[in-house]
């Protein structure tokens, strides 16, 4: 049931218009082989950590080898936040979302290595807030969706989905992006992609549990400073205009930092499903 709910939601997200801007600080191009892995790493939030009901919760991904996905055609990387119940209770998705954002990729903008995606979300504006005084569990979920779905060979294609859990509680500290300085990102997932599917009807995703190397991404002081500056710009922009996005300040750091603006959602599942139907029609 959870997978069905997630599938309906991600289809609906693909049709949402999202304003975003990118700023390439420095990049290297990685050529895609016949079978190559896309790695999704999470810099923030930290798995199982607990944060205050903050005005700005950083959402930061490190995406590696996106050229493997772009070789199959344009695609969208999206994330959302789903409530999962009380802390210490059974994790049960309710089919509702608090926030969502996405970035659209083509071969032209998927060459940066790594691709650092920076967002933030205002927990105080979430429709489904924490249960006082016990706090709540939330799931940061992500998905990769191609414009043209890859056909299958008498089997269902593997999901390009992922989930990381964190907690929100009124008595917990504010999130601090500086705390990740010198730390390896958290391995989200590695998706093995076969470009041979371009010439066949087989599924492109041959594995969704590959071995990753998140420590390839160096979260040093320069990167953290750039992320912090971007977050401040996003907060200022969201105060001025609800759907604004910020441009990352220039730097000599050898990373690409991009900003995908938030698209706040307090839709119930029915709304997401209606959006999916409209997209199909």
Image (cartoon, rainbow, N blue to C red):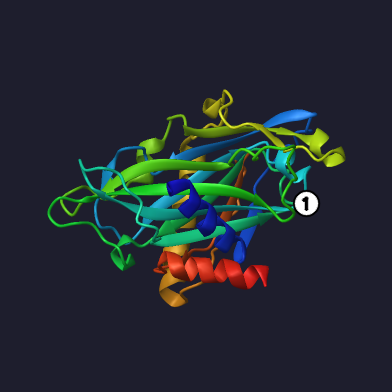
| Residue at the disc numbered 1 | 108
Which of the 4 quarters of the picture holds residue 160? top right
Query: Relative to 88, does residue 128 appear above or below in the rendering?
Result: below
Residue drawn at 20 percent across, 51 percent down: 135
Q: Residues within 10 Å of mark 1 (few under 14, many from 20)?
A: few
Residue drawn at 51 percent across, 44 percent down: 61
Element on which disc 1 rests: loop
Q: Position of residue 28 (x, y in %)?
A: 73, 37
Q: Is residue 16 left or right of residue 96?
A: right
Name of the residue lying farthest toward the left:
133
Query: Relative to 135, does residue 63 appear above or below in the rendering?
Result: above
Depth check: give the residue in front, 132 or 177.
132
Q: Position of residue 245 (x, y in %)?
A: 54, 66
Depth check: give the residue in front, 240 or 51.
51
Residue drawn at 41 percent across, 35 percent down: 181
Whether residue 17 is visible: no
Q: Position of residue 276 (x, y in %)?
A: 58, 66
Q: Position of residue 242 (x, y in %)?
A: 46, 74
Depth check: give the residue in front, 53 or 179.
53
Q: Is residue 105 left or right of residue 266?
A: right
Name of the residue lying farthest toward the right:
199
Whether residue 213 is visible: yes
| The C terminus, quarter of image | bottom right
Residue drawn at 47 percent across, 63 percent down: 234
């Amino acid at each position: 049931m959870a997978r069905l709910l997630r599938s309906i939601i991600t289809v609906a997200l693909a049709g949402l218009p999202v304003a975003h801007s990118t700023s390439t600080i420095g990049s290297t191009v990685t050529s895609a082989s016949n079978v190559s892995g896309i790695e999704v790493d999470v810099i923030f939030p930290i798995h199982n950590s607990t944060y205050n009901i903050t005005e700005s919760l950083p959402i930061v991904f490190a995406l590696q080898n996106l050229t493997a996905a772009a070789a199959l055609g344009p695609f969208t990387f999206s994330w959302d936040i789903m409530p999962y119940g009380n802390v210490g209770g059974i994790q049960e998705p309710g089919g509702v979302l608090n926030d969502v954002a996405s970035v659209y990729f083509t071969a032209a903008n998927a060459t940066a290595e790594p691709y650092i995606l920076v967002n933030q979300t205002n927990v105080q504006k979430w429709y489904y807030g924490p249960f006082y005084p016990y706090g709540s569990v939330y799931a940061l979920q992500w998905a990769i969706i191609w414009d043209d779905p890859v056909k299958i060979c008498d089997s269902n294609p593997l999901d390009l989905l992922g989930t990381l859990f964190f907690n929100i509680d009124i008595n917990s500290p504010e999130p601090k992006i500086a705390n990740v300085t010198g730390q390896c990102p958290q391995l989200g997932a590695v998706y093995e992609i076969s470009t041979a599917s371009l010439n066949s009807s087989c599924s492109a995703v041959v594995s969704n549990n590959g071995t990753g190397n998140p420590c390839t991404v160096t979260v040093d002081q320069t990167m953290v400073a750039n992320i912090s500056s971007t977050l401040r710009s996003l907060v200022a922009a969201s105060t001025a205009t609800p759907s604004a996005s910020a441009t990352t300040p220039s730097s000599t750091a050898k990373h690409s930092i991009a900003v995908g603006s938030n698209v706040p959602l307090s839709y119930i599942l029915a709304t997401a499903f209606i959006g999916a139907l409209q997209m199909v029609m």
